[in-house]
Amino acid sequence: MAGVPGSAPALELRGITKRFGDLVANRSVDFDVVGGEVHALLGENGAGKTTVMRIAYGLTHPDAGSVLVEGHEVAIRSPRDAIAAGIGMVTQHFSLVGPMSVAENLALGRASGLRLDLDAARRRAVHAAERFGIRVDPDARVADLSVGEQQRVEILKALARDCRILILDEPTAVLVPAEIEALFATLRSLLEEGLSVVFISHKLGEVRAISNRVSVLRQGQMIGTVAGSTDERELARMMVGRPMLGVERSAGAPAPSEAEPVLRIRDLRVDGAHGRPSVEDVSLGVRGGEILGVAGVSGNGQTELMAVLSGMRRPVAGTVSVGDLDLTGADPRQMTAARVGRIPEDRHASLIPDLSVAYNLVMERLDDFRHSGRIDERAIRAHADELIARFDIRASPDDRVAALSGGNIQKVLLARVLSRDPRVLVVSQPTRGLDVGATEYVRSQLLARRADGAAVLLVSEDLDELLALADRLIVLYEGRIVGEMSAQEADREQLGMLMAGRGRNP
Amino acid sequence: MRLSSISTRYPVSPWSTPALVLFAIAITFVITAGPILLAGANPIAAYAEFVVIPLTSQFTLLEVLVSATPILFTGAAVAIAFRAGYWNIGAEGQLLLGAIAAAGVGTTVGDLPGIVALPAMLLGGAIAGAAWALLPALLRVRFGIDEVVTTLLLNPVALLLVNGLLHGPWRDPVTGFPESPRIAASAEFPALIDRSRLHLGFVIALVVIATAWYVIARTPAGLRLRAAGLSPHGARFAGINVSRTLIVAALASGAIAGLAGVSEVAGIQHRLTSGLSPGYGYTGIVVATLGTLTMGGVVLAALFLGDLTVGASTAARSLGIPSQLGAVVQGVLLLTVVALLTLRRGNSSRPVDAGPPAGESAEHEPAPTEGAVT
C-alpha cells in the first residue's frame, strides 16, 4: 500500500524543533507519511508527539524546521493553511459548538455562501455517519452528548472534510472495540483511495493493528521508525526505554461471594436530556474487596451513574446506600463523610486547576487544616509533601494543578481520595489518556485498595482494563444493565455484543 | 529525572499583571493624545497635569486621598464578588442604599455621642447595602438568573428611591431643596487633618481592605471563595457549598459598597443628596479590574484614579481643557486593560503558539495569573 517509489511523501516534517520555555518538546524531529499508509506516532504522554503534529496542522509554530506537502515546502501559519494544503486533524480537545446539533456542527466545517441549507447538512451528516460506520444522532445537541460521542462527531467532521492527510490524535481513547474496528475499516478504505493517516497513540495493540510504519518519540526525540509488524515488546522498549509490566488482579479473588455488599444501588433512575431517563432500573451491589467493572460505550448512562455516586446529581427514583447509611441524594460532602472516594472521568473539572497542588489535596477537608482561624499553611505543605512522595506525584506543592501532565493530575486526585482511606471507591476512566507508567501506577493503586477490603466500582470503556482488574462485570446499554458476568467467564466478543446493544434482553 | 523537571515547570507569561497594567496606561496615553490635542492642549503637559501635579502639593495630595476613598470601598466590594465568580455590577445601588441608611441614622441620633452614632451609622449602611445585594444573589443561586442583569437593573431603582425620599418625606424643611436635613454633628466623620476634607472614611476603607485581604488570603473561608470563583464545579465536587459562598460574597460586597455610601454622607456631604455618587459604584468595577481583583491592586488603582480625578480638575483650570477628559482617560484605560487581559487569556487558551492545552501532556501554556493574592 505504500506510495510510488521515488515520489515525494504526502507530508514530510524536517528538523522540527519546539521549545516551551526551558522545555524542549521536539528536538529536530524528522517524520514523513506517504500516500496510502498509516504511519503511527508512538510515545508516552509528554513525549512530544502531539506537539509535532500540532505544528503540522498550524496550531503551534515551530522554532525551527519545515513542513513539506507533496515535496513542496509550505508555510503553515494556522489550521486554515493546513486545511488548504489537504491536512486534517482530530485533536484530543474538541472544537465543537455545544448548543448546535451534530448536523449543524458538520455543516460549519464546510459552510460556503451565505445561506445554510440545514436539510442538506442533516442529510450529509446521516450519510457520513453511515459511510464511516460511526453512529451519532444528527439532531442531538452536541452539549448533550457524552465525551465519547462528541469525539465521534469530531472524527466525522474531519473525515467529512476533503483532506489528503488525516492526523488523528489518540482517536480511539473513547471508542469501544467494535467501534475501533469500524474506524480501522474506514481508515483502510480511505487508504485505498490514497489518503495518508498519521495515527498518534500510546496503545501498542492498536498501533500494530493499523500501521504500516511506526515512529517512536521519547522525550521530544525521534527514537526510530520501524515496520508496523514489529512486536509489542520491542515497541514498548523503544517507547518507555524498558519493557512494560502488566498490572492485573491476582487470580483467586479474595472477595467472599456470600458477604453483604457495602455499596448498594436499588432501582436507580436518573433523568437525562430529551426527557428520557439516562439511567433506569439499575440495581447493583459491590462487596468489600471486590472490583465491579461497568462496561459500556460512553453515553449509555455511565456519566449519570457516576454523577449520582459522586453526589453531584440527585436521582429521580431509587436508593443508594453504603453499609447501613442511606446516601440517596447525598451531596459531595456527605459522600466524602461516608468514606466514598470519587474519581470521575473528568479530572480537570474535579479539581481547581488554578490552585496549587497542596491546596487541591486538602480542598475536601479545609477545616482539618485550620489553625486559630487561619489556613495552616505549614500543615498543608507537610501534608502535600507526604502525599507527593507517597503517590509519586511529579510536582512541587506550589505548582498549579493546571500546569501538570494528565498522569500527575490523576495522581493528585487519587492521592486526595486514597489518603482518606475510603471504604467505597467509585472510579471512572481512571487511565484514559495516561501514559504506560501512570496507567500501571493507577491500576496497581486500585488493586491495592481492593486488597485492603474496599468496594470498588470501576467504570471503563477499556475492556482490557476491565478484564485485568474487575472481579465481576456489568454492561450498561441505554441506561440499563444488559448483562452481568464474572470476569473469568467474560469473553470479549460477547461483551462487545452486549455493549453494542445486540445482547439478550435483560 | 527529567520527567519531573518537565512536569514541575511551565513558562511564565511574558505579560505579568503589573507589566500589563503599565502597558495599558502607556497605550491609554497614546490613544487619548488625540482628544487632548483637539481640546487645544499639549498631551505631555496634560498628562503631567493629570498625574504628576496632584502629587506636588499637600492640598492636592490630600484631595487625591479624598477622591480615592469611595472607590477604595467600591473597588474592594466589586473585587470580592468577582473573585467568588459573582458578577456584582450593583455596587452603585448598594452604595446609595448605604447612603440612605447613613442619612436616616445620622439625622435621628442627634443627642448620642459619636462613639455610638458612628458605629450605628456604619452598621446601618452595611446592612442596607447587603440587603440590596441579597435579592439578586438569591435569584442567582435559586433560579440561575444572571446577576449581571439583576444587580445592574437595581442601580436606577436605588437612585429612584433616593430621589423619591428627597422629593418626598426627606425634603429639607428649611431650604425646600431636594436634600435631606443635615446629619447630627456627632454623626459626621472627623477630619483626619485640620482644614482638609480627608476624613475618617479613608482609614475605614483601608481597614476594610486589609481585613478583606486577610480573609481571602489567609482563612479557609477565603480559600473556599477563591476555589468557587476559579472552578465552581471543582469546588462543589470537593464538598464546598458554592451557593452559600456566592451569597456570602454578594452580601459582603453589598455591605462594603454600602459603607462607601456611609463614608460619602458622613465624611463629605453630611446629608443625603441625589448627586452623592457620580458613579462610584461603576468606577469600583474599573478599580477592581485595574487592580486585577487583588486587594493591593485595588489600593493602587483607587489611588491612581483619585490622582487622575484631581489632576483632571486642576488641568481644566490651568490648561483650559474640559475636565471630562479625566473621565475619557479613565474610560479608555478600562477598555485597554480589559482588552489586554482578554488578549492574554485568549493567547493562552487559543492554541496558536501556546503549546497544547495543559493537562494532556507535559508541555504547557503560559500561565494566566488568576488566583494571585496581593
Image: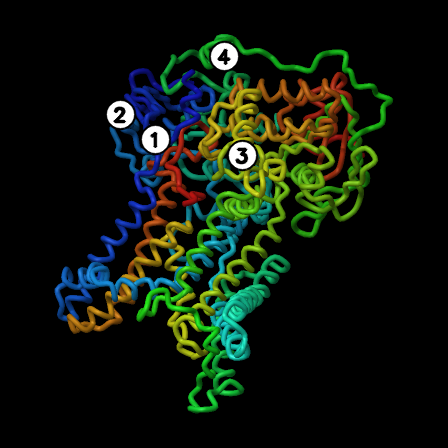
Q: Quadrant of the C terminus of chain A?
A: top right
Separation (CA) of disc 3 from disc 4: 31 Å
Q: Around disc 3, counting alpha carbons within 10 Å, would you say few (fewer than 14), some (14 to 19), or many (20 or more)? A: many
For marks 2 and 3 on the same chain, the one whose residue lies earlier in the sequence: 2
Residue type for callout 4 = Ala
Tell me, yes or no, if residue B223 can be seen here.
Answer: yes
Q: Position of residue A339 (x, y in %)?
A: 72, 33
Image height of A94 relative to A469, above or below: below
Image location (x, y in percent) of residue A376? 55, 36
Q: Earlier in the sequence, mark 4 or mark 2?
A: 2
Q: At label 1, which amino acid type do we have? A: Ile
Amino acid bearing label 3 = Phe
Which sits earlier in the primary sequence, circle 4 or circle 1? 1
Mark 2 vs 1, N-terminal side: 1
> x, y percentage for residue B342?
37, 50
Q: Which residue is identified by label 2? A: A65
Total numbered badges shown on the rendered structure: 4
Q: Is residue B35 above or below residue B240?
A: below
Chain to which mark 4 belongs: A
- The nearer-to-camera label among 3 and 4 is 4
